[in-house]
Amino acid sequence: MGLLSRLRGRSKSQSRAGNDASYSHLRMDDAGVPPLPGYAIDLTKQLPRPVLARIFTFVCPHAVNNTYDTSEESMTEDGCMLCDMRDLAHCALVSRRWYPVAQPLLYSHVRIDAVHYCELEEELAAKRKRRSFFDRNADPIDAPQVRLSLFMRTVRLSRELANLVLSLRMPYMTREASKAEIARTISVLSNLRYVDLPSGIYSDDPSCLTLKQELMARCPDLRRMTYRAGAEGSFSQLPDSNPWSNLEILELSNLQIEPSTFRISLASFPRLHDLAIDNTPLLDDSIFSSTQGLPPFPAIQRLTLRNTPNITTTGITEFLKHPLPGKNLLYLTLSSTGVPPATLHTLLSAAPSLLGLLVIQEVTRSFPPEKIPPLSSQSLQLLHYEITSPPGTYGVPPKAASYYTYLISTLMSNSLPALRDLYVRDADFPEALLLAPPPRLYGGGESGPQYVGGGLARPLNVFSKGLDELEWNFTPYEPLGSTTRGRRDSATRPVSFHDASLSRSWGGDARKSVLVGNGFGGFLAVPVEEERAKSSGGWKRDSRGDLWR
C-alpha cells in the first residue's frame, strides 16, 4: 500500500506540474502592476434612487409607458420588448439596493408579447418545436399564453406585486383565447388602469360576461372603455351603477342611442377628456345644445367624430362658443361628417386653443365661389386636410382641386403662423405650393376671391399622398430669403426628400424625387437615380404618423 500511495502521489504532482507549465504563458506578473482605481467599488451606491430608476427606464423603455394604448398601438419602432423586460429583471437581481428600484418598474406596465423581435426568436422557436420521445405528438407551446399563466400565478401569490400593476397588454389572439385567465388575473389587480380585453366585452357578448363582471367589481380605476353595437343596455345603465368614475377615454361605435340617453350617460364620467363617436346615426346637433333637465356636454380636450352626417358645423360651433369647452378643446377630428370644408374657418375661430385638426371628407361640389375667409388660428400646429373627390372626366379637374387652391391662399396669407406639419391627399400639392407666385394667391373657385400675402414666413413640413399611393411624400418648405428680394436661394429652397425616413405606420419610405432651383426663382422636378445624394438643403425628420401622436 505504501508503494501504491507513493506512485499515486507522484502522478498527481507530475500532472499538476504539467498543467502549471501548459498555462504558464497565460499568467501575468502582478508585481509592479498598480491596482485599478475604484476597483471593486460600486459607484451606483452614490446615486440617488430616482437617478437609478431613470437609468433603468433606458434599459426597458416600455416600463414607463403610462398611456392607454393597446398592445399593437404601443409597440416601439426598434428593439425587442421581451429582451428589454428580461434585462430589467436581471437588474433587479444584481443587488439588494437595485431590487426595490427595479421591481416597481418591472410590474407597473406589463407587456406579454407573442415573439421576440430579434434573432433570439429563431433559437427559441426551434427549441419549442423540439420534442422528446414521449411527447412528440403534443401540441406546440403557446408562448404568450404560458407567459400570461405565469404572470397570473405571480400576482395571485403576491398582493404587493399585484398592487403595483397599472396596465396589462397582450396580443390579440391571447386575449381572445384566454378570457378565463384574464378574469382570474385582473381579479387581484385593484389599481389597474388599462388592460387589453377581448372584443366581445365591448358588445356585451355572453362569453365575456364573467370577465366584465370581474372588471366592474375589481378594477374601479379603469381609464379607457369602449361601447359597441349590442352594448346599448349597459351604456344606458351607467347613471344607476357607474363602475368607472375615473374614466378618461371613451369610444362609442355603432350604437343605437338617443341624444338624451347619450347626454345622461356621458355625465357619469366627470374626468372624461377624450371622446370618440363613430357611426351613431341617431346622434345629431342636439347633443351639444343646452337643454334644461340634461347635464351639459363635458369640456373635453379631444373630440373625434367619424361617420356622423347629422352633426354639422352649427352644433359644434354652438358647443365651442361656451368659454370652457372652447378653451379646453385641443384636438378635433372630423371624418365623413356633416361639416363642409368651406366652414372650417368658423370652427377655428371658435377654438382658440386648438393644436391639431384632422379633416377627412369626400366632396361632390367645388369650393363655393363666394368670398370665404381663410383658415385662421394662432395656435394650430398640425393640420390634416384630406379632401378627396371622384376623378374628373374629359379633362375636367376634380372637384377637390379648388379646395387645395383655397388652402394655398390660406398658407400664403400667413393666417396660420403656428402651423408646422401639413398633410394633404393631393400628390401635386407641394409643387403647386412651391411654384405659386407669392404676391397674389387665389382663394375660392375659378372666379373666387384673391388674397394678398407675402408667402410663408415660417418653415412648413408638407406630407402629400395621392389617392393611389400608400406612403406619404415629405417636402420641407423654407420661407423666402430675406436677402434675396423675394427669391429663394440655395439655402432656403425646398427639397423633396430622397428616401425620406418615415415611421412604420405610414407604410415605409417616401417617394424618391428632388426639386431643384432653375435659376429664376422657380423650381424644376428632377428624377433621381437609386443612389443619388440628397440636395445640400435637405434634412431628415420623421413624420408624426398620427394626429394624436
Image (spheres, grey):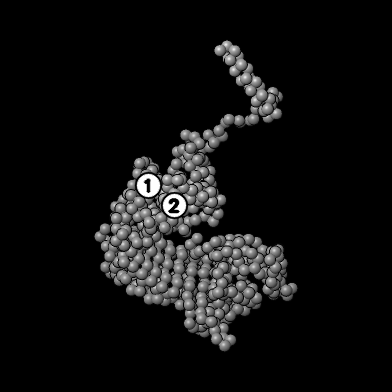
Residue drawn at 37 percent across, 44 percent down:
153
Residue drawn at 46 percent across, 47 percent down:
131
x, y percent for residue 194: 39, 54
Q: Circle 1 is placed at which residue position?
A: 152
- Tell me if label 1 and label 2 are in contact, CB under 8 Å: no
Q: Residue furthest right?
A: 519
Find residue 77 and name its label: none
Q: Residue furthest top?
A: 2
Q: Earlier in the sequence, mark 1 or mark 2?
A: 2
Q: Is residue 413 visible?
A: no
Q: Quadrant of residue 428?
A: bottom right
Camera-side residue: 527 or 38?
Answer: 527
Q: Quadrant of residue 41?
A: top right
Q: Say what amino acid the circle numbered 2 marks.
A: Pro
Residue drawn at 39 percent across, 73 percent down:
308
Q: Is residue 536 visible?
A: yes
Residue drawn at 33 percent across, 47 percent down:
188
Q: Which quadrant of the figure contains the N terminus?
A: top right
Q: Crowding near pointer 2: few (<14 within 10 Å), some, many (20+)? A: few
Camera-side residue: 372 or 259?
Answer: 259
Q: Circle 2 is placed at which residue position?
A: 140
Q: Crowding near pointer 1: few (<14 within 10 Å), some, many (20+)? A: many
Left or right: 545 in relation to 103 = right
x, y percent for residue 74: 48, 56
Q: Residue furthest left?
A: 240
Frontmost of labels 1 and 2 is 2
x, y percent for residue 27: 68, 27
- Whether 360 is drawn above or below 188: the answer is below
Q: Secondary structure at mark 2?
A: loop
Q: Secondary structure at mark 1?
A: helix
